[in-house]
Amino acid sequence: QVQLAESGGGLVQPGGSLRLSCSDSGMSFSFSMANMEWHRQAPGKLRELVAGISREGSTKYADSVKGRFTISRDNTKRTAYLQMNTLTPEDTAVYFCNAGFQLASYWGQGTQVTVSS
């Protein structure tokens, strides 16, 4: 059973943009209570935190994406977003969203982002 569903990945040229979405499809807690994060994992590398947004709306970013990526959420749509601009080949990875509330945590199945000319 899938509780979180990512979408929006794909192939984009360097300098391009993509917007990823992460939708609640059956978590055990209310989406509005969750702290949401985007992580990514490139081939041969560890999974890393890209961006996070708390239930209050405060945000954090990895240094490598500051000024290029923007995380947001729409609680009415039970969806979190990651707007990615000025993409580079180094952004190529599988992107995962995570929802956390107290001791509960859900991961999506990931969406592939490939930046290549």
Image (cartoon, helix red, strand yellow):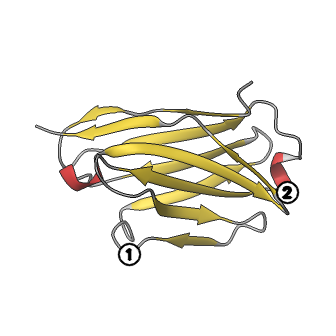
- Spot the residue most to the front: 44
Could you tell me how many numbered marks the image carries? 2
Amino acid tagged 1: Asp
Q: Position of residue 33 (x, y in %)?
A: 85, 57
Q: Amino acid at mark 2?
A: Met
Q: Position of residue 17 (x, y in %)?
A: 32, 44
* Residue drawn at point x = 64 percent, y = 50 percent: 98
How crowded is the residue under tag 1: few (<14 C-alpha within 10 Å), some, or many (20+)? few
Q: Position of residue 10 (x, y in %)?
A: 34, 30
The local secondary structure at tag 2 comes to helix
Q: Gap between marks 2 and 1, in whole Å?
A: 26 Å
**Which residue lies at the image location 55% right of the left edge and 58% below the top edge?**
71
Q: Quadrant of residue 35?
A: bottom right
Q: Secondary structure at mark 1?
A: loop
Q: Which residue is at the front of the view, 108 or 75?
A: 108
Of 70 and 95, the residue lying toward us: 95
> Which mark sits nearer the N-terminus, 2 or 1?
2
Residue that badge 2 annotates: 33
Q: Circle 2: is it few (<14), some (14-19), or many (20+) Cα within 10 Å?
A: some
Residue occupying the far left of the picture: 117
Residue 13, by quadrant, is: top left
Whether residue 93 sits left or right of residue 107 in the image: it is left
Q: Residue at x 45, y 42 (%)?
A: 19
Say whether marks 2 and 1 touch (CB < 8 Å): no
Give the residue number, with chain letter if any, for mark 1: 63
Image: 63 above or below 27: below
Identity of the residue furthest to the right in this view: 29
Asked whether 71 or 27 is in front, the reply is 27
88 w.r.t. 62: above or below:
above
Q: Is residue 99 above or below residue 56?
A: above
Q: Quadrant of the N terminus?
A: top right
Q: Quadrant of the C terminus?
A: top left
